[in-house]
Image (cartoon, rainbow, N blue to C red):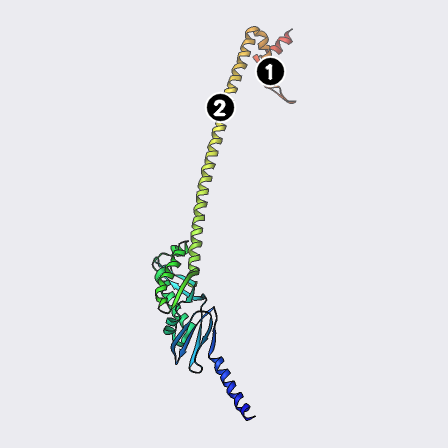
Amino acid sequence: MRKSAFFLPVLAVVVITALSSVFIVDEREKVLVLQFSKIIAVKEEPGLGFKIPLIQEVVRYDDRILSRDIDPLEVTPLDDRRLVVDAFARYRISEVQKFREAVGDGGIPFAENRLDSILRSKTREILGSVSSNDILSSDRAALMLRIRNAAIADANALGIEVVDVRLKRTDLPSQNLDATFARMRAEREREAADEVARGNEAAQRVRAQADRTQVEIVSDAKRQAEITRGEADAKSNAIFNQAFGADQEFFEFYRSLNAYRIALRGDNSSIVMSPDSEFFNYFNSVTAE
């Protein structure tokens, strides 16, 4: 009984010690074995690992590609048109031992703060060397590659590999938006006024051309009418002359009747003339008979 009472605690201690000396390395992580904060071993392959209990400790780091959003920052391109840039980066811990030596106990949060400083500096440097039109155009893919390549060297000192850098959003600062919108509105209003002025000028030309065409058409119509009227009068006079030549007495009688018809038109027509006027020759001749 006494032996079993002694044996069981010893066995428990042995089991606990054995279990605490074994650790598992997951395929998604890298592991450092530390002894009094000094790196003893680096485990990057998945599987079992061993350490000295109570003396050595295991520190785990994520081996996957991680994402880091960069706080929006203002940049000033070559044309002095300030822009607010919102970006993010993808990175991974490439050299875990160098990473531990660079960040110490701060771990990934401390490393990300250092990485933020690097990316913000390189972003300002690269975007400050081009115009705002280049940043807002399709060339921004080349600019993102330049930022990534510029950040790689500084990040390698931290044991970090920068995989990619992307610009999510590029806007004007909020204090400049109203002025920019006002300038855009003024430009559009000026363009609209120019279009209206050009439209009015074109309308005036069309209207003047239409008025001139109307005058020409009316003048030509009047000319043609006068020609036709003159030709008709000429034909009429020719007919009268022919009739007069055929029977002069009858023609004079006919003309007198037309004159009577025109002069005595209406119910109450009255004419004051001398009785022996030539106008009444045919009346006098009828009375004399």
Q: Is residue 71 above or below residue 209?
A: below
Q: Residue at x 44, y 43 (%)?
A: 198
Spot occupied by residue 256 in the image (x, y as percentages of width and height)? 59, 13
Of 176 and 65, nearer the camera is 65
Q: Position of residue 244 (x, y in %)?
A: 55, 9
Q: Secondary structure at mark 2?
A: helix
Residue type at the position of mark 1: Asn
Q: Quarter of the image containing the N terminus?
A: bottom right
Residue positioned 52% across, 91% down in the render: 6
Residue 148 rendering spot, x and y as whole percentages: 38, 61
Q: Residues within 10 Å of mark 2 (few under 14, many from 20)?
A: few
From this view, report whether residue 167 is shown above or below residue 243: below
Q: What residue would you read off at disc 1?
A: 258
In terms of image quadrants, where is residue 179?
Answer: bottom left
Residue where numbered disc 2 is placed: 223
> Residue 263 is drawn in which quadrant?
top right
Question: In the picture, which quadrant includes the C terminus?
Answer: top right
Under mark 2, the amino acid is Arg
Residue at left offset 53%, top offset 14%? 235
Q: Residue furthest bottom?
A: 2
Where residue 204 appears, x then y in whole percent? 45, 39
